[in-house]
Image: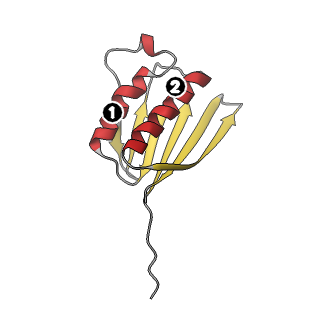
């Protein structure tokens, strides 16, 4: 009998601009989502002009995933890097390891889409 262990996977999709973050796959701790709710608003390029009524991650269905749109915010290349680092640090604190990434730019739509792939042993 062969036993195939399944490794939990997590995919984070970041679409710019405005920044939209989707987290799909294995479940996350609520504390991690709350940490990201606060920190992601602080690292956008336009963070100083952020509104007081900050958007928060919402749990959506079909398939189940977390979604956040930082409407009214903008990220240049440095802001995008800060978003990625904030996500990576929060997920590593929960035991996730980033195994890969993929970035695509649609010149016609002026949209960048970056995917971060995580696993946990």
**Residue found 40% across the figure and 23% down from its top:** 41
Q: Nearer the viewer, residue 5 or 37?
A: 5
Question: How crowded is the residue under tag 1: few (<14 C-alpha within 10 Å), some, or many (20+)?
Answer: few
Q: In the rendered image, which quarter is residue 7 located in?
A: bottom left
Left or right: where 99 falls relative to 93: right
Q: Position of residue 13 (x, y in %)?
A: 52, 42
**Residue found 43% across the figure and 60% down from its top:** 121
The residue singled out by tag 2 in the image is 18
The residue singled out by tag 1 in the image is 35
Is the residue 24 above or below the residue 83 in the image?
below
Is the residue 5 above or below the residue 105 in the image?
below
**Residue found 44% across the figure and 68% down from its top:** 6
For the question of whether residue 17 can be seen, the reply is: no
What's the image's color scheme? secondary structure
Left or right: where 22 falls relative to 106: left
Q: CA distance from mark 1 to mark 2?
A: 20 Å
| Helix, strand or loop at mark 2 | loop
Question: How crowded is the residue under tag 2: few (<14 C-alpha within 10 Å), some, or many (20+)?
Answer: some
Of callouts 1 and 2, which one flags the residue occurring earlier in the amino acid sequence?
2
**Residue found 58% across the figure and 39% down from its top:** 114
Q: Position of residue 120 (x, y in %)?
A: 43, 56
**Front tag of 1 and 2:** 1
Q: Nearer the viewer, residue 47 or 1?
A: 1
Asked if disc 1 and disc 2 are in contact, CB closer than 8 Å, the reply is: no
In the picture as drawn, the residue positioned furthest to the left comes out as 30
In the picture as drawn, the residue positioned furthest to the top comes out as 49
Left or right: where 110 falls relative to 47: right
Q: In the rendered image, which quarter is residue 1 located in?
A: bottom left
Q: Position of residue 99 (x, y in %)?
A: 55, 51
For the question of whether residue 70 can be seen, the reply is: yes
């Amino acid at each position: 009998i062969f036993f195939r262990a399944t490794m939990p996977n997590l995919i984070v999709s970041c679409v710019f601009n405005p920044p939209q973050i989707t987290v799909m796959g294995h479940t996350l701790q609520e504390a991690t989502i709350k940490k990201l709710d606060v920190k992601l608003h602080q690292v956008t390029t336009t963070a100083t002009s952020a509104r007081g009524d900050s958007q928060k991650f919402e749990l959506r269905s079909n398939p189940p995933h977390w979604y956040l749109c930082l409407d009214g915010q903008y990220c240049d290349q440095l802001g995008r890097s800060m978003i990625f680092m904030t996500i990576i640090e929060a997920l590593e604190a929960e035991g996730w390891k980033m195994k890969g990434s993929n970035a695509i730019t649609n010149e016609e739509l002026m949209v960048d889409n970056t995917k971060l792939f995580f696993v946990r042993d």
